[in-house]
Image: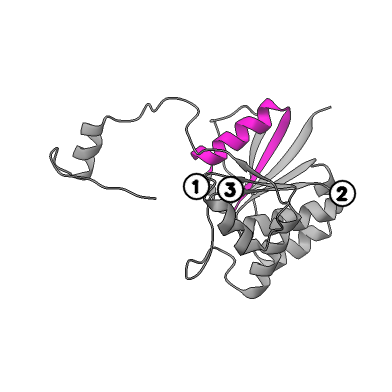
Amino acid sequence: MTRKAAFFESRADYFGRPLDDGVLRALLANGFDVDVYAPGGDLPQNLYPTNVRRCAVEYRRGWLQRNLSRRGHWRRYDLFLGTADLAMGFAGALAKLAGRPSVTVCDEIYLAGYEGLATTLYWKKLSQWAMRRAAFTIITDEVRIPLQREYASLGPDHQFLPYPSAYAAPYAGRTRTAARQALGIAEDDFVLSST
């Protein structure tokens, strides 16, 4: 019997980025069909097999309330995943409703003045609750562990799975010279980049 996962992402343009790609490929390798939910995410996809579908979600209270009344729909999923903050809040609430496990996929930490999508206390508390409820947290770097523990008030026994953000296939885009030309950067200019 095929297992199904619902993966909630913060943004539709996150589809296929390195961390999410790695998570999707791991789910596929473990026999899951995956529905990827994102705002405006009901889009065609050709990066993965046909058992990966893109679906729309609205990160609004009305959407969540309507979907909390659809328990049977959400029980068809065996696993819920959500990227940090609001997407995880929705994944966690629906996982609880369905009686299924959830996993936080965390490559962003929202502390101090850096706000994620959960900008009100209501959404922050829902997101933090969902992160505490998660079976474990996938992180891109171990330096995120203390930040995530602080942000979501995670206990000392909460498990983390480091999953480095990397592409599954070698880079096949334009050359460094072509990229510099497209951006108007001289060949001898020093470039420093950070994400």
Read off the magenta span: 15-39
Please say if 164 is above or below 169: below
Query: Observer-nearest residue: 194 or 45?
Result: 194
Task: Report which residue position mark 1 lands on.
Answer: 13
- Residue indicated by mark 3: 41
- Disc 2 is placed on an element classified as helix
Q: Do the residues labelled 3 and 1 touch (CB within 8 Å)?
A: no
Q: Which residue is drawn at 79% across and 46% down?
A: 101
Mark 1 closeness class: few <14, some 14–19, many ≥20 residues within 10 Å:
few
Sequence order check: which comes first, mark 3 or mark 1? 1
**96 to the left or right of 147:** right
List the single residue furthest toward the front.
156
In three-dimensional space, the C-alpha distance between marks 2 and 1, rounded to whole angstroms, equals: 29 Å
> Which residue is the site of mark 2?
72
* 34 magenta-colored: yes
Which of discs 3 and 1 lies nearer the camera? The answer is 1
Q: Position of residue 4 (x, y in %)?
A: 76, 36
CB atoms at circles 2 and 1 under 8 Å apart?
Answer: no
Viewer-proximal residue, 124 or 111? 111
Q: Distance between the residues labelled 3 and 1?
A: 8 Å
Q: Image quadrant of residue 146?
A: bottom right
The amino acid pointed to by label 3 is Gly
In this orientation, does residue 58 appear? no
Which amino acid lies under the numbered mark 1 shown in the image of this protein?
Asp
